[in-house]
Image: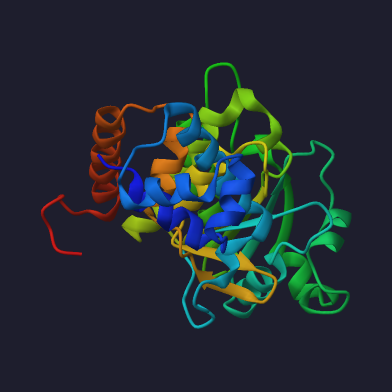
């Protein structure tokens, strides 16, 4: 594959002029111009530098929040990416779930999770001040549902617990279960990256089939250190939650983001990048229930 169009797309998407990006990469702006026009290809280490700059700027500028508003969309699955001290957008999701008569299960990575932890996610006044609200909101340890360990995520256990919770909620007259998984601290653990992606595929499957009365929001820390993982997470969600509510994710199944992730991980040969992108397309088609030849 030819990288020139991707270099130009990456630069314009993060809002940099040629001389600004050239300064950041420590090259002359005419060199960057030649890359973009396809006159010459960047060297492998330069491709990696471009990818890292692109991914870090996406996170630094929080570009995902500029998607089209999706306030009237019934959310089956969404993610929120935030830094320390920022609001997560979970308030919107919780209030929407309570208005729909759903039980809210908040999963915290802290084993000492308690109802006091809701203060960081809920408004000072609202449905939780009423007895009905208190009955509908539960705080559970994350590991009680999603066990991250040496053997990887226990998918059977997760599905079993989800099914039990759905049955219990139905007995109490709830219309479904809204799950909020707080993985902001878990994301910092390099050992569980594969588990996180397994969890993503599981929740994506549950949301796609539509047979489950569960829906979910997962909270992630917007990390400028784990940019490759951030790229995967951004790419896998069609909706992202902001403090103003949900928006359509402009990076969902995004080709340029996948290229940056591969280059950041130093998969630099054009043939290798093209082959991996083709596999990513197959995977995304599988997730959407389509074949690669189907029309979008």
Q: Residue 225: percent from the left, percent from the top?
A: 67, 37
Rendered image coloring scheme: rainbow
Left or right of residue 136: residue 231: left
Q: Can residue 160 be seen in this view?
A: no
Instruction: Residue 161 in the image: state x and y as whole percent.
Output: 54, 42
Q: Which of 179/30 is in front?
A: 30
Residue at screen point 22% across, 53% down: 289
296 or 96, which lies in front?
296
Q: Residue at point 64% right, 68% down?
A: 242
Q: Closer to the camera, 267 or 204? A: 267
For the N terminus, the quadrant is top left
Please tell me which residue is depicted at 42% across the width and 30% down the height of the picture.
43
Whether residue 6 can be seen here: yes
Instruction: Using residue 210 as the reference point, say whether residue 84 is left or right of it.
Output: right
- 110 with respect to 6 (left or right): right
From the top left corner, tell me how far across and down residue 232 is, in percent.
47, 43
Query: Does 89 sit left or right of 85 as displayed?
Result: left
* In the image, residue 292 above or below residue 16: above
Q: Quadrant of residue 245?
A: bottom right
The spot of residue 60 in percent (x, y) is 68, 54
């Amino acid at each position: 594959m030819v990288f020139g169009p991707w270099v130009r797309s990456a630069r314009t998407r993060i809002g940099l002029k040629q001389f600004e990006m050239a300064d950041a990469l420590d090259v002359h702006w005419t060199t960057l111009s030649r890359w973009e026009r396809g006159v010459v290809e960047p060297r492998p280490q330069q491709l990696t530098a471009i990818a890292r700059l692109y991914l870090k700027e996406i996170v630094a500028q929080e570009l995902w929040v500029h998607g089209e508003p999706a306030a009237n969309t019934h959310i089956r699955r969404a993610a929120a990416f935030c830094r320390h001290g920022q609001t997560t957008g979970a308030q919107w999701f919780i209030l929407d779930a309570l208005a729909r008569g759903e039980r809210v299960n908040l999963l915290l990575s802290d084993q000492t999770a308690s109802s006091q932890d809701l203060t960081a996610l809920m408004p000072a006044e609202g449905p939780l001040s009423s007895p009905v609200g208190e009955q509908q909101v539960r705080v559970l340890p994350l590991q009680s549902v999603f066990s991250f360990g040496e053997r990887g995520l226990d998918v059977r256990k997760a599905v079993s617990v989800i099914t039990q919770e759905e049955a219990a909620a139905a007995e109490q007259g709830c219309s479904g279960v809204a799950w909020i998984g707080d993985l902001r601290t878990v994301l910092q653990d390099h050992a569980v990256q594969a588990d996180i992606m397994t969890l993503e595929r599981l929740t994506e499957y549950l949301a796609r089939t539509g047979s489950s009365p569960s829906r979910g929001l997962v909270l992630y820390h917007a990390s400028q250190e784990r940019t490759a993982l951030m790229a995967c997470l951004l790419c896998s969600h069609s909706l992202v939650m902001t403090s103003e509510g949900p928006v359509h994710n402009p990076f969902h199944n995004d080709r340029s983001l996948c290229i940056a992730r591969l280059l950041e991980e130093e998969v630099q040969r054009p043939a290798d990048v093209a082959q991996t992108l083709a596999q990513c397309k197959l995977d995304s088609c599988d997730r959407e229930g389509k074949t690669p030849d189907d029309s979008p």
